[in-house]
Amino acid sequence: MKDLKTLKLAVVLALVLTPRAFAQETAAPPAAAPVATSPVNSPAALHDEIRKIRDEMLAAIARGDFAAMLPHLHPNVVFTPMNNHVCRGPEEVRAYFDRMLKGPDSVLKSVRFDIKVDRLTDLYGDTGLAFGDSDAVYVMRNGMELPIRTRWTCAFVRHEGRFKIAAFQASPDAFDNPILTQKARLAAFKGGGIGLVAGILAGLLLGVLLLKRRRA
């Protein structure tokens, strides 16, 4: 009789506990909390940040306020313009623009840039790489305007929570640019002038020789 009561108790416990245990085993695991993404670090926001840098840099150059460029330059920035003069650091970049456009020996009166990118900046975490071409007009002190098309590359690095320009280099076509054309014309003019003078001297010398022979 005691064994029968024990068996009934075991059956009751099994019926009561089994559904709970089964429910616990088959219950779906809690969903993982979604990873919060900051809109500040989204690709769209980063590209907007880079566009703002471009616009503010061009505006600073256009109005001759070269000090306004400094906040957008990395402390170790390397800037290489068309004349291959290498500037290292923001202050050297500012001094270069002052010397070219403001100094007593400046050769430029103004410069205008029309920057175009080949595609959106390639982003690699805390770095970015942009490249494209530029149609620039350099106005010389003598009033001559030189339209020059260049290819450029710009590298960005995340510094103190924002992108800054770490390197910039621009280069024109070595075989098709107005500076080369002007030099070629000047060389041709000088060569023609020298040839003309030489021709005149040779003619005079020949005339003197013929005159002496006739007299003899």
Image (cartoon, grey):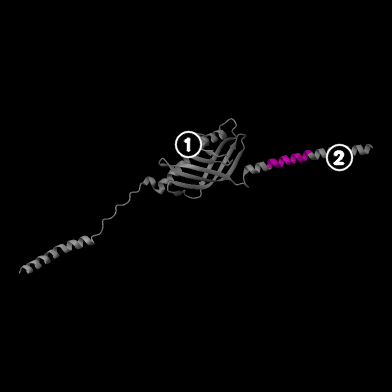
Q: How many marks on residues?
A: 2
Q: Quadrant of the C terminus?
A: top right
Q: Which residues are magenta?
A: 185-197
Q: Residue at x 68, y 42 (%)?
A: 185
C-alpha separation, residue under disc 1 versus residue under disc 2 = 67 Å
The residue that disc 2 covers is 206
Residue drawn at (82%, 39%) of the image: 202
The amino acid pointed to by label 1 is Leu
- Residue 82, how many percent across, how many down? 58, 42
Asked if residue 190 lies in the magenta stretch, the reply is yes
Residue nearer the viewer, 45 or 26:
26
Residue 87 lies, in percent from the top left, at: 54, 38
Residue count near mark 2 (Cα–Cα under 10 Å), binned few <14, some 14–19, many ≥20: few
Give 132 or 13, whichever is nearer the viewer: 13
1 or 2: mark nearer the eye: 1
| 141 relative position to 11: left or right | right
* Residue drawn 60% across the image and 40% down it: 146
Residue identified by numbered label 1 = 70
Q: Earlier in the sequence, mark 1 or mark 2?
A: 1
> Overall secondary structure of the magenta stretch?
helix
Mark 2 residue element:
helix
Task: Give me the disc on residue 143.
Answer: none
Task: Please state the horizontal and vertical placement of residue 11, each as a whole percent of the image.
Answer: 12, 67
Place residue 23 in its image quadrant. bottom left
Query: Is residue 189 within the magenta segment?
Result: yes
